Image: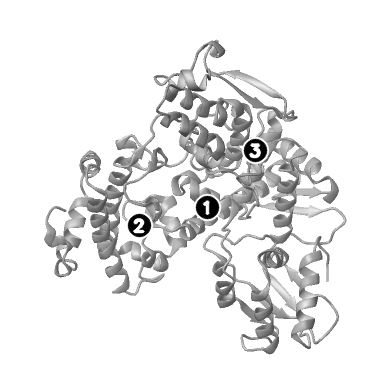
């Protein structure tokens, strides 16, 4: 890459592909040495290398017609340049701001295997990834993980190639990823080049195949044992006792056979006729989250300043309750449902194996972070002017003060200019890790019960995990209008459809969220934004006083052909404001 000619257009078609092929065939130790060498480059040099490889990939993509018969995976130049880009990616990580030390301890108890394991082996269905999640060989050779990097030399987003994502046949690529054959390359082995939408599709395939596998095993078990077993993770709950019913059932499943958590979720509200094709599950998750994060329950604390929740270190709930919450979070990802949860980013970093540190307080507790930052930057005598010690105070659930020594006999150890760095580090360690250790370990264990065999940690960074769980807060209704389809006699040019979009665009933010909730079962946009939603507006008869209705399972809005825009607005607002529950039309 020192040869400046390689960056010129005339070398793009012949010289650079050959150069990439040669580099991609280097043995693993040589690739690691190259990554180490490049890690000393400046951000601008790294960016220039990234642009060179990206230029080649984009050129090959747009100059060929890739499809299901002519796969981009079979293009040697694209594959070779992607492999070269991986070396630059790890150089970017190595040269960035690394935190190699603060790693979460592994779970003391392994996640129990299914009691079906023996039968699976007999049927040739041996559980996949028994040895744990996949790890990139170059990552192992270098002794680092992407999550060790707090700030890379250049943004991770610069490694994503959008034209490649558009032509990638993800179903085929996922197959190559799982089979791991030498003659077929999978771009999932280089997740840095994929955007969140493409990676989410790969995760969706993995989850669905796992669900089908569990269903098949259950059917075969029924044949062998002669008793009827449920091929689904079926939850029947009462709307007024949703926490008691759901969490008790999940607790029984977690103890008896955790593999059942990997079956497809099927929720039924007692006394309601809704059939769960996805919409009932969406409302189930929403109601569970509302209950769990209710401050009156006391499992989580709500920060009015940050509008986020944090684990309550003095909660009276047992660890099992936090395990169940982790299971709910894992089930939401596994069943492709978005949750309205508000955690600081440090929670997702901790789920991915990294402890919280002082810099995480900037988002988790900005007031405390600012105080500790001022302490670090204070130019006078800390001991004489501030008179603080290694004993700190915080409050319990009822606002009572609690004292904690950061060091033994901390109340007798003054904080000085010399030891203030240690004080700040230990303060952050206590607030983000030690004080909530029991609660978080139980929460993480529940999460891993569902996701332990998933490529989740391999594919996604912490900020992308948040996007998977919470969805996007950016609601672009113009993008939704562009991708919406019509049925039953409506089309884009129908009078009622034009009036509908004019009405919807005139709504305030809260009303738009109510509409999304009414139509899709959640008020968040999926990964990739509202343009990925695929909503359908279907005609539901002529002008009438009936309200609009919806099939949240399929994102279908059933809209009567109201006589005027005023009536449309009045009926629609009433429907979205007072909608709750499931019934048969």
Secondary element at tag 1: helix
Q: Nearer the viewer, mark 2 or mark 1?
A: 2
Note whether residue 540 is visible: no
**At 51% from the left edge and 59% from the top edge, which residue is drawn?**
201
Query: Whole-percent x and y of residue 81?
Result: 26, 58
Considering the numbered disc 2 on the image, is that residue within a helix, a strand or a loop? helix
User: Label 2 vs label 3: CA separation?
Assistant: 39 Å
Rounded to the nearest angstrom, the CA distance separating label 2 from label 1 is 26 Å
Q: Residues within 10 Å of mark 2 (few under 14, many from 20)?
A: some
Q: Which mark is residue 206?
A: 1
The reply to whether discs 2 and 3 touch (Cβ–Cβ < 8 Å) is no
User: Is 15 or 133 nearer to us in this picture?
Assistant: 15
Residue carrying label 2: 158
Q: Position of residue 27 (x, y in %)?
A: 22, 43
Disc number for residue 336: none
Residue under numbered circle 3: 258
Q: Nearer the viewer, residue 111 or 512?
A: 512
Q: Which percent across, then down, holds residue 151? A: 38, 44
**Residue 420: quadrant of the picture:** top left
- Looking at the image, tell me whether mark 3 or mark 1 is earlier in sequence order: 1
Could you tell me which residue is drawn at 69 percent across and 23 percent down? 401
First reached walking from the N terminus: tag 2 or tag 1: 2
């Amino acid at each position: 890459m020192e040869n400046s000619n390689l960056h010129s257009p005339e070398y793009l078609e012949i010289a650079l592909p050959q150069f990439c092929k040669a580099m991609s065939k280097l043995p693993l130790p040589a690739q690691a040495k190259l990554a180490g060498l490049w890690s000393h480059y400046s951000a601008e040099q790294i960016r220039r290398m990234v642009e060179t490889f990206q230029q080649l990939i984009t050129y090959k993509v747009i100059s060929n017609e890739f499809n299901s018969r002519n796969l981009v995976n079979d293009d040697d130049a694209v594959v070779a340049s992607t492999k070269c880009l991986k070396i630059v990616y790890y150089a970017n990580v190595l040269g960035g701001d690394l935190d190699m030390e603060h790693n979460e301890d592994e779970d003391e108890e392994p996640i129990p295997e299914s009691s079906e394991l023996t039968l699976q082996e007999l049927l040739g269905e041996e559980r996949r990834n028994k040895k744990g999640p996949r790890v990139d060989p170059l990552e192992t050779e270098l002794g680092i993980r992407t999550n060790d990097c707090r700030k890379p030399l250049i943004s991770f987003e610069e490694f994503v190639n959008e034209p490649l994502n558009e032509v990638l046949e993800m179903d085929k690529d996922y197959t190559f990823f799982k089979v791991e054959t030498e003659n077929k390359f999978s771009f999932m082995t280089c997740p840095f080049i994929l955007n969140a939408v493409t990676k989410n599709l790969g995760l969706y395939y993995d989850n669905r195949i796992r669900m089908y596998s569990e269903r098949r095993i259950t059917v075969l078990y029924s044949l062998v044992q002669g008793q009827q077993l449920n091929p689904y993770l079926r939850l029947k709950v009462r709307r007024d006792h949703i926490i008691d019913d759901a969490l008790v059932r999940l607790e029984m499943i977690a103890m008896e056979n955790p593999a059942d958590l990997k079956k497809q979720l099927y929720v039924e509200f007692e006394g309601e006729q809704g059939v769960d094709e996805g919409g009932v599950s969406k409302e189930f998750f929403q109601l569970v989250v509302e209950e769990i994060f209710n401050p009156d329950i006391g499992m989580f604390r709500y920060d009015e300043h940050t509008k986020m929740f944090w684990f309550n270190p003095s909660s009276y709930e047992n660890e099992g309750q936090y395990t169940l919450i982790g299971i709910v979070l894992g089930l939401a990802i596994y069943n492709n449902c978005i949750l309205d949860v508000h955690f600081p980013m440090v929670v997702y970093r901790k789920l991915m194996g990294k402890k919280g540190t002082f810099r995480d307080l900037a988002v988790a507790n900005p007031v405390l972070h600012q105080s500790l930052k001022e302490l670090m930057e204070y130019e006078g005598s800390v001991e004489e002017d501030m008179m603080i010690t290694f004993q700190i105070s915080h409050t319990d659930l009822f606002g009572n003060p609690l004292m904690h020594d950061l060091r033994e006999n901390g109340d007798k150890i003054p904080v000085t200019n010399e030891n203030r760095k240690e004080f700040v580090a230990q303060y952050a360690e206590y607030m983000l890790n030690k004080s909530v250790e029991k609660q978080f370990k139980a929460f993480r264990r529940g999460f891993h019960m569902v996701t332990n065999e998933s490529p989740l940690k391999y594919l996604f960074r912490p900020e992308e995990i948040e996007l998977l769980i919470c969805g996007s807060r950016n609601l672009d209704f113009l993008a939704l209008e562009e991708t919406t389809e019509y049925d039953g006699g409506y089309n884009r040019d129908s009078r009622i459809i034009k009036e509908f979009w004019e009405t919807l665009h005139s709504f305030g933010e809260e009303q738009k969220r109510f509409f999304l909730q009414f139509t899709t079962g959640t008020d968040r946009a999926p990964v990739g934004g509202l343009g990925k939603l695929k909503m359908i507006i279907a005609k539901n008869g002529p002008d009438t006083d009936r309200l609009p209705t919806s099939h949240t399972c399929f994102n279908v809005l059933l809209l009567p052909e109201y006589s005027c825009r005023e009536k449309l607005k009045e009926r629609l607002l009433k429907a979205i404001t007072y909608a709750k529950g499931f019934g048969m039309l």
